[in-house]
Image (cartoon, helix red, strand yellow):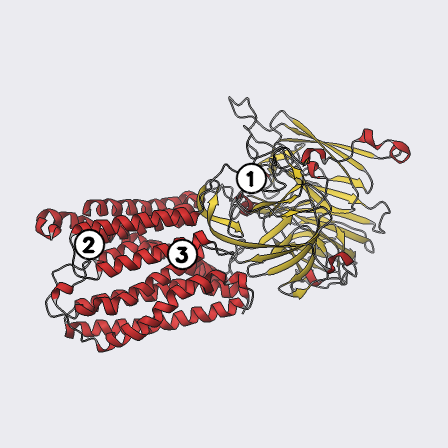
Amino acid sequence: MRKVFFGLAVVQLVAVLAQFYLATFGAFERPYPAPGDPGAAIGYHAMNGTMVIPLVSLVTAIAALAARAGGRTAGLAIVPFVLVAVQLFVIFPLAELAGASETATTTAGLFVLGFHALDGVAILAAAVVLVRRAHALTKSTAAVPAHAAA
Amino acid sequence: MTTARLIALDQILFVLVAAAWAATAGFALTGLRQPAAAGRRTRLIAAASCAAAIVVTALRVAVTAGLAGAGWWFVAEKVTLALPLVVVPALVSAAVSLPRLLRGTATGSPSDFPAGIPADIPAGIPAGSARIVAFPLLVTAYGAVAGIACAVVISYPVTAGGAAAVLALFAVASAATWRLLGPARSPRHAWQAAGTCVLALALALTIGGGWPSGHLHSEHDAGGHDAGGRGVSVDLLRGPAPAAAGGPAGARERIRRFTLTAQPATVRLPSGGAAEAWSFNGQVPGPVLRVRQGDLVEVVLRNRLPVRESAEQAGTGQGVTIHWHGYDVPAAEDGVPGVTQDAVWPGQTHVYRFRAEDAGTYWYHSHQNSSVAVPRGLFGLLVVDPATPVPESEDHVLALHTFGSRPTLSVDGAAPSDLLTHLPLPPGARTRLRVVNTDTQPVVLGLSGAPYRIAAVDGGDVPGATDLDGARLHLAAGGRYDLTFTVPSGPVLLTAGNRPALLVNGPATPPPAAGPVVDITRYGTPAALPARFDRFDRETTWVLDKTLAVSGGLPRLAQTVNGKAWPNIPTPVVRQGETVRIRVVNRGTDTHPMHPHGHHVRILSRNGVPATGLPMDTFDVAPGEVWEVALVADNPGVWMSHCHDLAHAAQGMEFHLAYEGVTTPYDMTNGNHPA
């Protein structure tokens, strides 16, 4: 189970790294797509961010619990899920409250939207630490087989 | 505070509530694992966090109460599901966990350690109360997270499937936690717990996502597609043929024939930018079709767009149709692929025919892959001049369109310009500017330098239009305003967004209009509504939102109507001659220019404030707004109703309005793609 957990943690890290790649993959599309254009290249970033990362985070947290990795590690596994919720339901609404819309931004709105990237960095940090912990757990299984059987 | 702001605040609060309860549970678990003395500080932090969580939860209840004032549609899932799931366990936490965290001295035996916690904990810690102290906190945290899930999965109305999905996840997580907090068990139990969780997750996603059961575009129970061959086919609801228009009056009938050929073209902007476009007759926008009231209009559409290599059958290459935006043509001439015709593929032609009975400003555009085709240039303007001319010496049509990121203006069908366009007009002339927003986003217009009137909205004259001075106008995507003014001796400036777009008589430029934005629903004299609107034969509600729904065959965050995305939105069915009251509620955070085909609607009220009753065909429903509009079912057919932010339509916000007994032989096969 710890190997499964480790595998899922790696999948999560890959999804988060892909998210950074997809952000710039979409950012430089020219001509600019219309706001919300379903064919826009930035759509892959939105899709991965709203669907794949939260789902993988949820499954990884369940796997962490099943692997008896401890509440803290399971909590860390769910952090990307929570931080995605922060992106969707805190940062974007705050930007709207600051006057940003689909077609126009305000200085205050841009100030808020800048935190979109920092929140992404926090997700990346959580994913990296989780992979290291999950890796350490697979090592400890080998070292202390009695523990796993306990 | 406006409803839109309350919606945004609520979104922030439900994440804060979840974060606060999760943090409280985390601190409490940590504190319980530590020795009594060392853990005292952590447990006090947990107690403080618990108090903060109670405060933000109370705030969320207050915001929900505020939203309830705007209508039940905005709070249904919060009142029935999201808030009970967090408030009830929060009360238990406040009564049970909080006092114990503050005292924090319970003790238990090491065998009571929660199973999820490594066994390398020093003895003598107060783990015995783990279930009593931590369980209510964790369950509250799950309830708070379920509140986030509610916002993503459930719209209005609250569906049994969505509620069951959220409740199932909540119950499974709570039950698993109860077991994990108990005495340590063998790893097999952990495996079983994990397996149960994953199964429950899959089940919840399956139910909540509402996977489509049938084939695409199947949900037309009555009056929809191919109802067993019964009823009238939409194909029979054609415009008048010239041959049939014989007889004494028909002999003098004016027939106006146009050919529109869809073909590639390059748009070159004066600023130096260029864009590859799809055009009608090599022009972007397409030719201005100007006809007179009473004319029979016949338009031959030819598709000369490129065919993909090795493509020989229909459904490859770029299909085209022509939809007459705002013109209530007979159903078969409406130009919606898969509903009133098949898309016209490269090499094919199609003829549209309708009588120009209503004077006014309209436009036409392709409805095949419209979210791609319209921004790329497959549109043009249609003007029907009144049979008796109005006393205006100058009359100009203005198309606002964004190419790539560049907003442009085209005057009288000329090439679009992204720089300031100059229009010299004789001082003293009574002038009409027909402004058409062909973009997928609203635009704020300003006219400065002369008092002006909104003479017509969406083609229809405004009764009792009054002079405006410095006021600005919000024009919906797809909407039209006819602005009239007498040309002064000085210059007049039209701004679109923040961009100076048109300068009448220069060279000096007046400062842009900066006045308040006119509430179009209250402009002009209140119209006496027809007596038939005293009571309505049918009422229907469209609740617009962005939630998880199946769109394009996959569950995704879609633009939804009543919680469903195209093609799964149930079809409102009406009978010919009925009056229908439509309530449009925007629960989401995007503006939706709603556009019912084939009919103009009368605006009855906005946010409960009575309107003047103007007829419109595209009206902008902003976040948090509730519009009431009235429709007379006087044009039988199977019609499309959709958001004219065409990207939203492509993401699910489109559905039908069907007449009883009318069927269509077309569907979404053969490459038809109306959004």
Identify the residue at image location x=37%, y=68%. B88
Q: Any mark on residue B149, and which?
A: 3
Instruction: Quadrant for residue B113, please give it.
Output: bottom left
Marks 2 and 1, how far apart in space? 49 Å
Q: Are marks 2 and 1 in contact (CB under 8 Å)?
A: no
Seen in the image, is A30 located left or right of residue A125?
Answer: right
Q: Any mark on residue B372, and which?
A: 1
Asked if B493 appears above or below B598 in the picture, the reply is below
Quarter that holds the N terminus of chain B: bottom right
Estimate the x, y position of residue B131 in percent, counting from the top left. 23, 66
Quarter that holds the C terminus of chain B: top right
What amino acid does circle 1 point to?
Val
What amino acid does circle 2 point to?
Ala
Estimate the x, y position of residue B562 in percent, counting from the top left. 54, 52
Instruction: Quadrant for residue B342, please give it.
Output: top right
Q: Any mark on residue B538, and which?
A: none
Asked if B78 appears above or below B412 in the picture, the reply is below
Q: Nearer the viewer, mark 2 or mark 1?
A: 2
